[in-house]
Image (cartoon, rainbow, N blue to C red):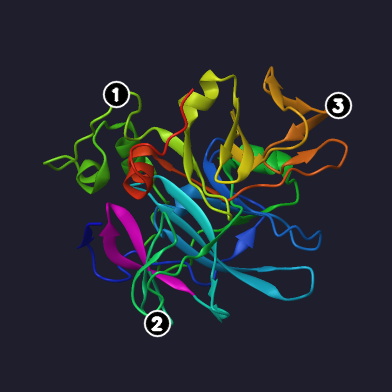
Amino acid sequence: MNVISVLPKDAIPSIDDPTFGDEYFGGPDDEVLIVDPGDEASPARAYPIRILNYHEIVNDTVPVADGDADSIAVTWCPICGSAVVYEAIVDDRRLTFGVSGKLADDDLVLYDHETDSEWKQSTGECIAGEFAGERLRVRPGPMTTYRAFREAYPDGIVLQPASEGSAAVSGYDPSGYEAYEEREAFGLRGMRGEGPEREWHRDDLDPKTVVLGVTPTDGGALGFPLPVVEAAGGVVEATVGDTDVVVLATDDGLHAFEQPEFELRIESGLVSGDGATWTLTTGESNDGRQLRRVESRRLYAFAWQDDHGRRSFYSL
């Protein structure tokens, strides 16, 4: 693992006191991360990537059924296209995170304010400090469009722009990051438009192919490239570790669930199975049943390969 310092600590400001509202200033096709507390009294939350590009971390708390609140860290690395929501509790200690200014294999390195330990964003592993070797637990955080979020959660709330005085109050211009997405080069130098560029020695995937990396709690790791899932008709079944999973791709994004006892299929953009239609954003059917999500994270192929190796991809 190659760790380098790029910026001063906190040069990119995390959001530590997030505010939410009913309106979003961006467009319907903008991507968002979703956190659903699963409590009718607490609406689902959308965290727009357009805001996360400028902050990379949102420290938040979400209410739970017993009246308590869970501490979470909503994290995003623009270089790796890596979106992961973590439970921010380790050894019964609640943590909050900031941007360290370092990169590990071009991926964001978080640090926690409580111990100054450093954590690799794409894996949740502590790579230095008091918690070295520990891993943050992944929380369901599907990535989809704002339109899909609003359709699935009409009462949902949206992260609002940071308050005045923040380094990010600039309209959250997405153009710089859109240019990187369109560029063949990848990694830090690819984002900056500098050389020498990183090399990529494979022909089956582009380095910035979107991948859903599935990492069930009982072990195993397998990356599902979006084009591969689409080539299979949008539905792929596989075993990762000891867990049977189904991965689905629609216009609403990539989603992974534990394999139900029936077959899911996609026809004319609709997901159906066992006499019901299913909404992937929520995992719910029109008759009230619920699919169970497996731990996963969305990221680029090069970042998944950095973490898990060349042979860690699903192929047909």
SS at mark 3 in the image: loop
Residue type at the position of mark 3 = Gly
Residue type at the position of mark 1 = Asp
Count of labels in the image: 3
Residue that mark 1 sits on: 203
Does residue 247 appear to the left or right of 127 in the view shown? right
Q: Is residue 51 visible?
A: yes
Q: Rate crowding at label 3 as few (under 14), some (14 to 19) or many (20 or more) other CA atoms within 10 Å.
A: few
> Which span is picked out in magenta?
96-110
Residue that mark 3 sits on: 275
**At x 30% / y 38%, what residue is drawn?**
180
Against 27, is 133 above or below?
below
The span from disc 3 to disc 1 (Cα, nearest Å) is 40 Å
Q: Quadrant of residue 247?
A: top right
Label 2 with label 3: CB-CB less than 8 Å: no
- What mark, if any, has residue 115 been given in the picture? 2
Residue 45 location in percent, x, y?
64, 55
